């Protein structure tokens, strides 16, 4: 094929893909209107898209927003209503818009304040669609900023709630090396934060009089870590998951004694045996009997309710929600065979599930089984016709 024919073929494929995508989003819109996701036990339509199509939360959210804004909706009377962004919808169905351009247009128009008139919104949408013929998504974003500057020059007015409540934000991310990275901001009214860190962050000369070699940021980091340890030791933190905050680490006794290998707490971030030894200096050590594959064999007694001892064993095995991998503090114990049906409250008949996955098991057609200490989930037929077993995220390497 010549270069010209290749370019023509690419353009034809783009138009055809627009038609296919529009049909897919029409289906998503119909699922949303019919509340199909909750009927099948999912949290909502977004949750159903993630489970059914194996989408990330970000991609599922993008497809959901496209369907809501570019597909026809239905009034309470049953009347079919035009799409919220009808101009962009028509361009999309003609195959003139890429997905990234659609996301930009949806974001720009939907973020316009309510005081902007319908006419101005339609003109803004038409302008963005026209500019999409010449610009990619980053260029459209710049056009969108100019539109916002023109239609909303003063920006959103602060609400009474924003004026009364200081804004506080904290973002946390655990790196592959186990270090916790965070960023955020605290309102000026929260002056006690600096007052707490200041005495703990003072330079501390060595015993021989050598000046403190730590930088200011290092001293602040050490001060924050010390403050968090003081809070953890206070015994006044709230209860999560039916127990006080604590750190449970699974490793062999030989590893702890010989200081070899790495240990994994609930968060999944590795800790060296030397670090565990430091933590164990002033901590309670709870022994657990492990099998040859590091599967907890037994902890606690058989009762109707899951005891703290059994919960610790479930955490050691499941490391959080046995299906999706959410942290242990978001989970509750679930009987594979219900206690009322003769099921025992023991390790071989219990799993940890978050509320969302718990609903899927009870109402979404998902089944649970435990094979050789490994938790497996059998999806409903509408997800996998053969209902092939799926291991939870935390047990993929088991």
Image (cartoon, grey):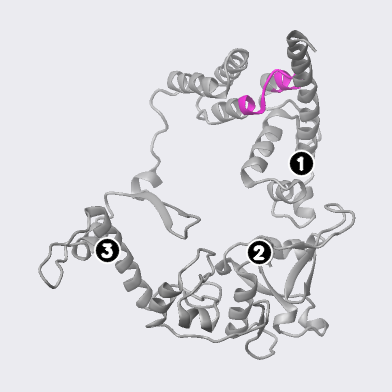
Q: According to the image, label 3 marks what residue?
A: 223
| Image location of residue 369, percent across then percent down | 79, 72
Which picture quadrant has residue 348?
A: bottom right
**Label at residue 33:** 1
Q: Decide: few, some or many residues near mark 2? Use Cα within 10 Å; few <14, some 14-19, many ≥20.
A: some
Q: Is residue 219 left or right of residue 145?
A: left
Q: Decide: few, some or many residues near mark 3? Use Cα within 10 Å; few <14, some 14-19, many ≥20.
A: some
Residue 219 colored in magenta in the image: no
Indicate which label's residue lies in the foreground, 3 or 1.
Answer: 3
Q: According to the image, label 2 marks what residue?
A: 355
Residue found at the very far right of the displayed protein: 386
Q: Vertical placement of 162 versus 5: above or below?
A: below
Identify the element where label 2 is drawn: helix
Q: Residue at (61%, 17%) from the top-left corner?
A: 132
| Residue 168 can be seen, yes or no | no
In the image, which residues are magenta?
Answer: 89-102
């Amino acid at each position: 094929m010549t270069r010209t024919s290749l370019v023509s073929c690419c353009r034809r494929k783009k138009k055809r893909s627009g038609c296919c995508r529009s049909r897919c989003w029409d289906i998503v819109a119909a699922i949303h209107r019919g509340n199909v996701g909750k009927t099948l036990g999912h949290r909502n339509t977004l949750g159903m898209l993630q489970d059914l199509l194996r989408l990330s939360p970000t991609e599922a959210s993008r497809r959901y927003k496209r369907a809501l804004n570019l597909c026809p909706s239905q009034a309470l009377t049953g009347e079919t209503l035009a799409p919220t962004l009808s101009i962009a919808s028509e361009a999309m169905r003609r195959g003139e818009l890429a997905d990234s351009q659609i996301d930009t247009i949806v974001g720009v128009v939907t973020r316009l304040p309510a005081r902007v008139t319908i006419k101005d919104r339609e003109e803004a949408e038409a302008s963005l669609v026209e500019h999409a013929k010449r610009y990619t998504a980053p260029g459209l974003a710049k056009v969108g900023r100019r539109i916002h500057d023109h239609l909303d020059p003063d920006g959103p007015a602060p609400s009474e709630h924003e004026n009364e409540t200081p804004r506080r934000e904290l973002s946390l991310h655990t790196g592959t090396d186990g270090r916790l990275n965070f960023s955020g901001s605290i309102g000026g009214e929260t002056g006690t934060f600096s007052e707490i860190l200041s005495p703990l962050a003072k330079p501390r000369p060595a015993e021989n009089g050598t000046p403190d070699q730590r930088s200011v940021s290092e001293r602040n980091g050490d001060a924050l870590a010390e403050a968090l340890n003081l809070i953890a030791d206070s015994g006044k933190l709230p209860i999560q998951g039916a127990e006080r905050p604590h750190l449970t680490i699974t490793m062999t006794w030989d590893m702890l004694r010989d200081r070899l290998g790495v240990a994994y707490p609930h968060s999944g971030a590795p800790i060296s045996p030397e670090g565990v030894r430091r933590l164990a200096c002033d901590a309670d050590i709870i022994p657990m009997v492990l099998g040859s594959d590091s599967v907890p064999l037994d902890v606690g007694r058989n009762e109707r309710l899951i005891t703290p001892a059994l919960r610790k064993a479930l955490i050691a095995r499941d490391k959080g929600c046995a299906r999706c991998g959410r942290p242990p503090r978001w989970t509750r114990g679930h009987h594979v065979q219900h206690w009322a049906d003769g099921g025992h409250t023991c390790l071989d008949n219990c799993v940890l599930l978050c509320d969302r996955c718990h609903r899927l098991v009870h109402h979404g057609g998902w089944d649970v089984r435990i094979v050789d200490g490994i938790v497996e989930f059998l999806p409903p037929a509408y997800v996998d016709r053969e209902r092939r077993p799926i291991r939870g995220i935390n047990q993929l390497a088991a």
